[in-house]
Image (tube, rainbow, N blue to C red):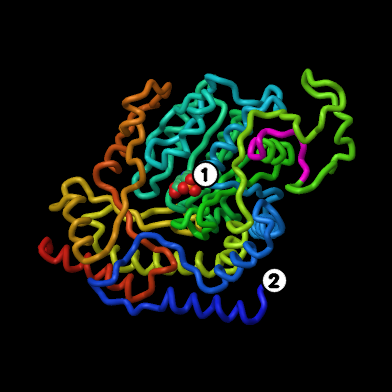
Amino acid sequence: MIDENLRAEIIKYYNLKFPQKKFEPGISSVLVTGKVFDENEMLKMVEAVLDGWWTEGHFSDEFERKLAHWLGINFVALTNSGSSANLLAVTALTSKKLGDKRLKAGDEVITVAAGFPSTVNPIIQNNLIPVFVDVELGTYNASVDEIKKAISPKTRAIMIAHTLGNPFDLEQIKKLCIDHNLWLIEDNCDALGSLYNGKKTGTFGHIATCSFYPAHHITMGEGGAVFTNDATLNSIVRSVRDWGRDCYCKTGADNTCGMRFGWQLGDLPYGYDHKYIYSEMGYNLKITEMQAALAVAQFDKLDGFVEKRRANFNKLFEGLKKYEEYFILPMWQTQAEPSWFGFLLTVREGAPFERNDIIQYLLSQNIHTRYLFAGNLTKQPYFVDNDINYKISGELKNTDLIMDNTFWIGVFPGLNDEMVEYTISCFDKFLEVYKK
Ligand SMILES: Cc1ncc(COP(=O)(O)O)c(C=O)c1O
């Protein structure tokens, strides 16, 4: 435990190392993302170090329990990244434990190319076929009409992200999944805290994922999670995450099942130690207690972070809506209350400037920007250079436009009102010359 002296030392260190800095327009950077923390994160992590346990333990349990309650979901399984969470979610659906419902090699999974690679890579890794559909401009989410057209007798799942925190059409897509008997995997990595009809995203699909990389709503340094209401899926995810083992003892525990030497599984001899029986093809994708301790401290700030993201987004929207003739502004469904990851803008075709002109200008004013991740994933070198088995349904017209014309700016809680107002004033300056 941390005594008062050590506590005071850590707080002193924090204040010296991370002093509050005054924002100086043009000199200080206006970033797109970043971790926001105070001395409490340091205190919790030091506590985890001094505990001497280090692998999954009481901090992991506490964070899983708190996050599950906050989301309104039965099970949260922590893992070492959002990419691992996506791998676990898809791999779990291929398990023999699911009988006829399991995904098999050659099954088709509908997804989008305008997004992050590790939403799609687990589909390929599991010998399934990604079928790419186009997205809508403004929401940047999969078009429901395009999904409908892409459904074939081989379609078994839909796996898509809530783009930059903007919930996709959960009403219609969930209905499609029910009508066609499809698995729904929500990549909720960029959307922690988003609501749809008042319910948190990540709780609608059969299985959902989350990332705690520093850019995300809360961080563990590196980390992720898989959410589900289904006890069978939860136990498969945990097994694949923990080397594929059949045994479900917590780290450091023995004989939770009460018959450690009493199982007859596979072709192993009767009584083979349950600790070393593997019923899934697994890995070790667990987290450490230091990561979980960080998450516990961040969790206390989560509601405030979501509120600040929304406030920054709204301020930007108010300040930039006058430029609709040049940019496609963000759009969202009336049922949605996004917990925004960023503020997306698409330079309209026919605008008197190009994307590069505006982002270079912003950068010259120390305002940072990002593209919508991979743009069109099928045009990335690893897709072009490899023999990847995929399909495109219809045309990826908007996806290509996004690759060419879209960028986003930050809304993260590290941005204060002054920074947001400065950003708007830089758009004003850039666009002044084009005023008629
Ligand atoms: C939509 C989406 N899915 C998955 C990931 C992967 O998360 P991680 O970086 O934790 O592996 C990201 C990363 O930012 C993402 O934006």
Marking on residue 1: 2
Residue at 35 percent of width and 41 percent of height? 374
* Mark 1 surroundings within 10 Å by alpha-carbon count, few (fewer than 14), some (14 through 19), many (20 or more): many
The residue nearer to you, when weighing 221 against 422, is: 221
Q: Secondary structure at mark 2?
A: loop
In the image, which is nearer the foreground, mark 2 or mark 1?
Answer: 2
Against 219, residue 179 (above or below) is above
Q: Quadrant of residue 101?
A: top right
- Residue 210 image offset from top left, x and y in percent: 55, 49
Could you tell me how far apart the alpha carbons at marks 2 and 1 are, in whole angstroms?
37 Å
The reply to whether residue 169 is visible in this rendering is: yes
Q: What count of labels does the image hold?
A: 2
Quadrant where the N terminus sits is bottom right
Q: Quadrant of residue 233?
A: top right
Q: Earlier in the sequence, mark 2 or mark 1?
A: 2
Label 1 residue near ligand 1, CB within 8 Å = yes
Q: Which residue is mark 1?
A: 187
Left or right placement of residue 391 versus residue 195 in this view: left
* Mark 2 surroundings within 10 Å by alpha-carbon count, few (fewer than 14), some (14 through 19), many (20 or more): few
Type of residue at label 2? Answer: Met
Against 312, residue 349 (above or below) is above
Left or right placement of residue 58 versus residue 305 in this view: right
Magenta highlight: main SS: loop
In the rendered structure, are the residues bearing label 2 and label 1 in contact, judged by CB atoms less than 8 Å apart? no
Type of residue at label 1? Answer: Asp
Q: Secondary structure at mark 1?
A: strand
Q: Magenta stretch?
A: 240-249
The residue nearer to you, when weighing 147 against 214, is: 214
- Residue 65 image offset from top left, x and y in percent: 70, 57
Residue at 46 percent of width and 28 percent of height? 130
- Residue 97 image offset from top left, x and y in percent: 72, 28
Residue at 60 percent of width and 33 percent of height? 183
